[in-house]
Amino acid sequence: MNLELTRKLAILQATAAQLRETSRSFTETSDMFAHRQFQFELAEYLGTHRAAGDIPYDPDVYVGEELDRIERLLEPVAKFVKEQLELGKEILEAKKNSLTLPQIQECQTNVDAAFNALVETQHRLASGFLNKDLSVEPTGIDLAPDLVVFTKLARPKSTLMQPDRAGLCQFAHGEGPLHAQVVTHLETLRAACAEFIALHAEQAEILQRAYALAEAGDFARAAA
């Protein structure tokens, strides 16, 4: 099968489907004739390449199934990114002294686990993509251009038309702005946990010193 030809014909089929909708409002004879001619030539072209075995019977159906698969691949990527960015939000939004030491230590453990699992998880998320799904653009990895064109024509409401599509593709491959955002969030969270733990240690030391002074009867210094 010729993949490039299949996708080009799928785009033409999607264009033809749009033209069928708009042709109902055609009033000029020349427009109606041009539309019929386009539909006829496309059908003839499809028939020729079907007979030659160059393409699947319905290129648009084939490409549509490719999009279904890619949409399913991006769902867990988006879910994972969201989970990472929400990790430890209570720590970053908390006031000093408002969290218990066990809460902070649990968050620190979770952050360390997230860092340790990040690369492995990204490898797993990226493993579902096929080379034909993606393209390296000047802005980074993204959906293959012919798939983008087909999606715009045939599935304008697809999740593949969301602004974060390229970012999710890049994140799965360990690069791009979403990857940087997740790493920065985890680093910030790790630093916040360390700061809170140091604060708790300082407070514990102060309390211990005050208790020792009180035990010795030095209540004036213990209260200072």
Image: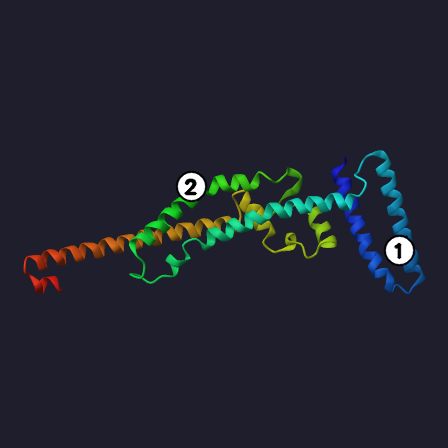
Image coordinates of residue 89 in percent, x first then y, are 41, 57
Q: Is residue 127 above or below residue 33?
A: above
Q: Bin the neighbour count of mark 2 within 10 Å (Cα to Cα): few under 14, some 14-19, many 20 and up.
A: few
Query: Image quarter for residue 103?
Result: bottom left
Of tags 1 and 2, the one toward the viewer is: 2
Position of 219 with respect to 178 (left or right) is left
Q: Which mark is residue 35?
A: 1
Residue drawn at point x = 21 percent, y = 55 percent: 204
Q: What is the C-alpha distance between the residues marked 1 and 2?
A: 58 Å
Mark 2: secondary structure: helix
User: Sequence order check: which comes first, mark 1 or mark 2?
Assistant: 1
Image quarter hosting the N terminus: top right
Three-letter code, disc 1? His
Position of 105 with respect to 174 (left or right) is left
Residue drawn at point x = 56 percent, y = 41 percent: 126
Image coordinates of residue 211 in percent, x first then y, are 13, 57
Position of 179 with respect to 136 (left or right) is left
Mark 1: secondary structure: helix
Any part of residue 140 in sight: no
Residue drawn at point x = 35 percent, y = 52 percent: 191
Image coordinates of residue 214 in percent, x first then y, are 9, 60
Q: Bin the neighbour count of mark 1 within 10 Å (Cα to Cα): few under 14, some 14-19, many 20 and up.
A: some
Q: Which residue is mark 2?
A: 116
Image coordinates of residue 193 in percent, x first then y, are 34, 52
